[in-house]
Image (tube, coloured by chain):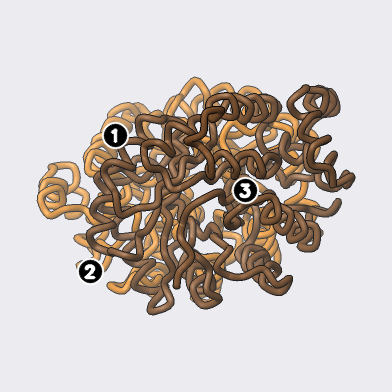
Chain colours: A orange, B brown
Amino acid sequence: MQRTLGGLWPPVATAFDDDGGVDSKRLVQHSRRLLAAGASGLAILGTTSEANSLTLAERRNVIDAHLEAGIAADRLLPGTGACAIDDVVALTRHAGEVGAAGVLMLPPFYYKQVSDDGLFAFVARVIERTGAKIPRIVLYHIPPIAVVGWSLDLVRRLIDAFPGIVAGMKDSSGDFEHTRQAIDAFPELAVFPGAEVYLVKALAAGAAGCISATANVNAGPIAALIENWQEADAERRQAELNTVRQAVASRGMIAGIKAVLAARYGEASWLNVRPPLTKIDEAARAGLLCEPAIAALLEAAPA
Amino acid sequence: MQRTLGGLWPPVATAFDDDGGVDSKRLVQHSRRLLAAGASGLAILGTTSEANSLTLAERRNVIDAHLEAGIAADRLLPGTGACAIDDVVALTRHAGEVGAAGVLMLPPFYYKQVSDDGLFAFVARVIERTGAKIPRIVLYHIPPIAVVGWSLDLVRRLIDAFPGIVAGMKDSSGDFEHTRQAIDAFPELAVFPGAEVYLVKALAAGAAGCISATANVNAGPIAALIENWQEADAERRQAELNTVRQAVASRGMIAGIKAVLAARYGEASWLNVRPPLTKIDEAARAGLLCEPAIAALLEAAPA
């Protein structure tokens, strides 16, 4: 039986060594800790993972490192989006062959203002070429970064053309109304808001769970709220999640997450990012770690 | 002696067969015709070439196909931009090793609102890792598509840090004032406007030449105007170039160019594009070929 696409799937931050290489050991260790903290699975190779700053071979290695470490393939939801169809096919097929829970798929993001027909043809060709081992696809909608997005009309066409394959959507539009529209329009999809800022509202509307950058540092409380969002203190806990998120995001999301991980794990190498991103600067790092919400988080969940 | 970075370098449209594969034979034939029509060199693997829709191996093959066909390496200015540093390095090093005139380099284009420091670190790492065979770099500024661009401040920093390596800039901002600022600020760079719409003005201001999509269909007249922009009829000829460009661009630039090439060469396969782009529709194709400027072009330069 396939693992349900639901609950918390953190977009796992990628560990780099001081020369910029992927540090698989630290990465997988972080992944284990996220599962132990309550994550349902791992959305490796997403935006927070700096996946587009990795070569195809490196991305494949990240998947394999998790499997070699004994993490079950159906706990993995790797990002396989790219601008060239055959790159998407290579990675998607690998994910399918090893038995991943699914793949998180960006639209091709170089050309802008492309038509829904063109994006439909892109996905159709990916599915056709990937062949029998095609895993479930979670469409990754993140217009603030990719600029190109999956329109609701196009999602409907894709579901109808590829039922059972197009199985989910991560909505990182940042707009609750858009998430609600997607949930209402696509009862057959597992819809994940791309941030926990309106988590309770989204779950009440029928969201499957959450795929959020800040889950890298706050997995336990987010997973708990997904579990118990109907309890009386849900709004208070939602506010607490938002305080953490705001503290991190205001320092630059990815660099900020890595600063918290460096502190939690006592490993300065966690600060490393790949260009074009830049390491958090020292003042911002100090300010972040002194935020009461972050200090409390680090005390509550030490390495 | 290195070939001067100047004159007309068309961003060569890539020929695809009906299954979507790169048709190297038709592609190289087109490249030859562009050189015969007066192009100084070939900006293969650019935006018009759909380079980001090609895998790294396919891009490498496009370079090699030109060399195998006997086109001199110093007539090639391949695009080597990508989002992952080691992808840029692999292709840039190959271009350097074969002796290309230079490379046209996009900034990494996935993350948006990245800092100049991050982009500087990206280029620095590409140059360092590429090693001794680093070719000249023409910075490719195309914010309407890549969104991320090379700011003038950053270009200055790059020139100062890597003199002789950072050697040019393609300015596809579409803004003459921006092009003029770049020309004035960087006398050591070969600045190419990314379109011929303000060609005479740009040449008068000191531009090195032009790298323009429409050069795929109008190379002779553009090359001639670069040569003779100081003659009395320059403004009339500029207007003629603009009429051709407007006719093509209004049908979608890349699909429109391919429609003209399909007609000129009598090869319907030239209509093929890779998703997410879409083929020109039949009505637009008919309309384009009936435009007086396009009909005249096809009569003047038959296959």
Mark positioned earlier in the residue sequence (1 or 3): 3
Chain ID of residue with mark 2:
A
Q: Residue at x 43, y 44 (%)?
A: B141
Relative to B94, B241 lies left or right: right
How far is the residue under mark 1 from the one under mark 3?
Answer: 26 Å
Residue B91, compared with residue A240, is above or below; it is below
Front tag of 2 and 1: 2
Of the pair A163 and A21, the residue shown nearer to us: A21
Q: Secondary structure at mark 1?
A: helix
What residue did someone put label 2 on?
A267
Q: Amino acid at mark 3?
A: Thr
Of the pair B289 and A277, the residue shown nearer to us: B289
Q: Secondary structure at mark 2?
A: loop
**Local crowd size for mark 2, using a 10 Å CA cut-off: few (<14), some (14–19), many (≥20):** few
The answer to the question of whether label 1 and label 3 lie on touching residues, with beta carbons closer than 8 A, is no
Q: Which mark is residue A242?
A: 1
Q: Position of residue B128 (x, y in %)?
A: 34, 72
**Local crowd size for mark 3, using a 10 Å CA cut-off: few (<14), some (14–19), many (≥20):** few
Q: Position of residue A71 (x, y in %)?
A: 52, 69
What residue did someone put label 3 on?
A4
Front tag of 2 and 3: 2
Q: Position of residue B3 (x, y in %)?
A: 48, 65
Tell me the quadrant of the picture where the C terminus of chain A can be found. bottom left
Residues behind callouts 1 and 3 on a single chain: yes
Mark positioned earlier in the residue sequence (2 or 1): 1
How far is the residue under mark 2 from the one under mark 1?
Answer: 26 Å
The answer to the question of whether label 2 and label 3 lie on touching residues, with beta carbons closer than 8 A, is no
Q: Residue at x 37, y 63 (%)?
A: A33
Q: Amino acid at mark 2?
A: Glu
Chain ID of residue with mark 3:
A
